[in-house]
Amino acid sequence: MKNPFRKDLVSRSRPEACTVVIFGATGDLTHRKLVPALYNLQVEGALPAGVKIIGFARRDKSDEEFRSGLEELNKKVSRSGHDDKVWADFEQNIHYHQSEFQDQEGYDRLAERLDEIDRERGGKGNRLFYIASAPSFFDDVLEHLKKAGLSESEDSCWSRVIVEKPFGTDLPTAQHLNQVVNRTFNEKDTYRIDHYLGKETAQNIMVLRFANAIFEPLWNNNYIDHVQITCAENLGMEGGRGGYYDKAGALRDMVQNHLLQLLSLVAMEPPTDLSADGVRDEKVKVLRSMRQWDTPELVAENVVRGQYIAGHVDGEKVVGYREEDRVDPESMTESYVALKIMIDTWRWSEVPFYVRMGKQLPKKATEISIHFKEPPTVLFNALAGGVPGGNVLVIRIQPDEGISLRMVSKIPGANLRLEPVKMDFHYATSFGKGSPEAYERLLLDSMAGDATLFARRDEVEEAWKFIDHIENAWHESKNPPEMAEFVAGSWGPKEADELLAKSGHKWRRL
Amino acid sequence: MTETTQDEYARALGKEVAIGSVDKELRQLWEEDKASTNASLVNLAVYSEAEGAILRNSEIVQAITREHACRAILIGIDRDAPEASIRAWITAHCHLSQQGSKSVCCEQLAFQLTGKATGRLRNTVFAHLNSDLPLVFWWQGELSPIFSERLYSLIDRFVFDSSEWSQPLESFQKINQVMEESDELYPLDLEWTRSYPMRLALAGLFDDPLAAQALEHFNQIRIVVHPDHAMAGLQILAWLVDSTGWQRSQELGLCGETSPESSQGYCFHFETNEGSNVTATVECDASSAQIGLVELSGADCTVRVLRNAGSSYQHQQLEAGDHQIDQLMPAASTDACELVADQLSRGGKNTLYRTMMPLFLDLLACQGG
């Protein structure tokens, strides 16, 4: 039944009362991100009344112990601050459910508990299952949910699942996982989360492109020379993350999901509407159009992998990648990757997209820069110093969210000399208020049934197809391309600079 | 103006400048301070005819600019003064950015006018708007003859607080007339903003299927407000009825009697879409919070949002047989400065306000304005 009071009250999709079951409830993601996000939504009145949260995990805990652990962290990380009274009320709706992930009986008990909650709530059985457990348990959780009858919903109710990354480790595992997910849940009820897409600036890419008449006409190979997408991190393998990272690497950990998602937003055609499938149809076309680097030679020519050696970051001495905790001393896992991606569509013909991601770089920054072609220099080519680089539009995703545009200007004075100047827009200084956490937006969207900011099955598989060719060339070919080295705290190996130099380009200095 | 007041003006409003050199002085202000970033998303004009308001408004603007980058223009007018005069001051309100790395500043221009001022307000004051940015005009107090077509045709968003009006029916009719004439001007009534958390909480409760099922079977709406906020009570009622599509009762007529619950309240009659009668009361109670209670009941179901006077929380409550919800949520501040900040952050076209206005005007007229 439609709620007439929601109409026009808020401009976003309407969420319905539901029970959120989080698998992996004792983990960091639940404590640092998911529950604080739900709490913030409650504080802002965005959460529908009657939402229940059930944490599902293996450890033995009481409701009180579980709640107190969540509260402790919420005090530290909540964006909206921590109000004891509101928390006391909020936590009444949080419960703990102890079970092994492989234990069917635990899921049967969960089903009974959910039925009980639904009866109390008046028969509305909306359920949102959030699989935040280790990826090795994804299959178990999904299969057991189905056996317990929890993946199906009655008419007018829904049962949805959010699957955290990594969504597979290569194409076959992603396909397998997709098969398992689709055996248990409808594709329309499956939400593959990529928290990058919940960030304000990522969402703003479509607005920037399609709501500003000055950009869309220029957004093609007539005017754009190349595009760079950079994700730089100034951390290494602190906190024991070397164990996971050494199995994944930069390409699988970041490029396959976050960076290719950003690339598809930048390169997509205008969708016919803003529906989830309208947008995702266009994104997947981009992924399908990426030229495949499917031989070791093509990979060697278009992809650079690297590892950092000891150096200095933020004035601190840091060890090399192979000396990091829980990293194999002979590891051939890349902590840095740079790629040249060609999108074979009418719009992007011959426009390279350069993507790079690295650990232990000089600073933390994620941004997309659109480099426009330079105008013919007929008028100014005789000037001393020539014409400085052309227009660059930069979309900063983090940490300083904003947009800037570089243009060429005349230096004041009698002489005609040209220099670049920058127009800058910062979210933080213009809008003041901090942006909501990506998870807040994404949790609310999934409750409201809006999958626009979640990856669809075909998107994930297309991205893996592209990535797998590169991984195979690195790890399975007889003639694998070299592993480049760079000093920690620098902007990556010289091979990455050469990758761009071959086409007359260079990395933007961040 | 006394000497002390002169000092107060200088302290609050910054450097006094000649009208003709406001732009030049502003440029100098920025050239002198290289560490600051000048940011602006809107022009925010704050208008008052009350004595000394311009000083208070400078403090309010300082708080607003923490979250909303704008060019602020304070306007104080003494229309009864015999002589026409105009003075101007400039300053900047600076705050550390979220990262704390740099100071973000918003310009403030203050104009004090005396005597007949409509032309000078439009021609002199508005000559100092930041180009291409929308003009949000916050009118404080009663609407005066200065609020005319030649003024509001320049405004994008018109902020006012109807709880301040002594003759609300007359002023609302003026606002309504403006809204009918122009789709371009968005009225932002702070009294309406004040009721937003209540409306949001109530809407949240109707996500519950039992509440939704009971909607057509309710026969009682009860709204309790503080006597100073009767407008909010009527607006909430107009919104509730308008959202459901209920009609005014043909049999009983819209205008009812004084509420039996309170000698200061009023009673109205509606019919649900299934033809049941609904009695709605708006009660004014001096011991209530500004908006103390919104309750719908009938058919074994009660949906209620309540806030106690002095409390910074509001309760969402649902009682439907064994099924009960009682949730606490922070109630938004009703401070004028925060209400304006809230309006600035929301954007949009305020369509609900336009939609509920016809019924609200009828309710107001029934109540005697």
Image (cartoon, rainbow, N blue to C red):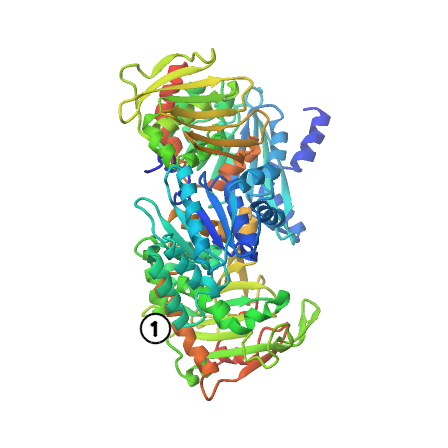
* Side of B361 where A231 appears, left or right: right
Res. B228 visible in picture:
yes
Residue A117 or residue A19, whichever sits in front: A117
Quadrant showing the C terminus of chain A? bottom right
* Side of A490 where B225 appears, left or right: left
Q: Is residue B239 above or below residue A51?
A: above
Q: Is residue B364 above or below residue A425?
A: above
| Residue depicted at x 56% and y 63% | A365
Residue A304 or residue B321, whichever sits in front: B321
Q: Position of residue B6 (x, y in %)?
A: 69, 29
**What chain does badge 1 belong to?**
A
Residue B296 or residue B147, whichever sits in front: B296
| Residue depicted at x 48% and y 82% | A475
Q: Position of residue B302 (x, y in %)?
A: 42, 27
* Side of B113 where A265 appears, left or right: left
Res. B45 visible in picture:
no
Q: Is residue A24 above or below residue B311?
A: below
Q: Position of residue B346 (x, y in %)?
A: 47, 40
Res B341 → quadrant: top right
| Residue depicted at x 62% and y 80% | A329
| Residue depicted at x 30% and y 55% | A272
Res A85 → quadrant: top right
Inspect the image, locate mark 1, and give the three-letter code of the amino acid beneath it.
Asp
Residue B43 or residue B15, whichever sits in front: B43
Quadrant showing the N terminus of chain A? top left
Q: Identify the element where label 1 is drawn.
A: loop
Q: Position of residue B262 (x, y in %)?
A: 47, 13
Q: Which residue is mark 1?
A: A344
Res A224 → quadrant: bottom left
Q: Residues within 10 Å of mark 1 (few under 14, many from 20)?
A: some
